[in-house]
Image: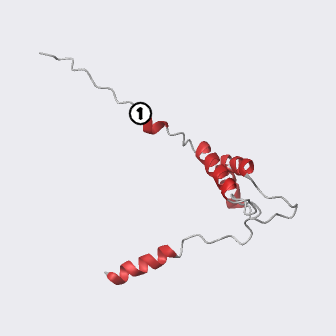
Amino acid sequence: MMIIAGLLAISLAGCAPGPSPVAGTANEEGEMAGFWQGLWQGIIAPITFIVSLFTSDISIYEVHNNGGWYDLGYMLGLAASLGGSGRGSTTVYRRRRNRYVD
């Protein structure tokens, strides 16, 4: 059992993301993606993902970004495009009135 748990832990640790060597560097045009570009790319991420399955020139995440601000914009845009508004957590439950009161 310990061997299986160890192999599972090693397998999961291999999936952890590492640092990007091009993060914080400009692209060929001398630009880095910021908050607004991250927001836009997060909004169009579902469509971009489908296109990226058939085209090797398209990726869903800009690697030449300015770090945390791009990531925040990307996550907000992704949440907006996938319907993550938080309305599900504010569901109001109503009591049913007993129609057959003695």
Of 5 and 65, nearer the camera is 65
* Position of residue 4 in the picture relative to residue 50 (left or right): left
* Residue name at image x 72 percent, y 66 percent: 23
Q: Name the residue that disc number 1 marks.
A: 91
Q: Quarter of the image containing the N terminus?
A: bottom left
* Residue name at image x 43 percent, y 76 percent: 9
Q: Locate residue 71: give its quadrant.
A: bottom right
Q: Locate residue 61: give its quadrant.
A: bottom right
Look at label 1 and name its amino acid: Thr
Of 15 and 34, nearer the camera is 34
Where is residue 24 drawn, in percent x and y?
75, 64
Q: Where 62 falls versus 98 (above or below)? A: below
Badge 1: few (under 14), some or many (20 or more) residues near its Cα, within 10 Å? Answer: few
Where is residue 67 drawn, in percent x and y?
69, 60
Where is residue 93 drawn, in percent x and y?
35, 30
Q: Where 29 falls versus 10 (above or below)? A: above
Furthest-top residue in view?
A: 102
How many marks overall?
1
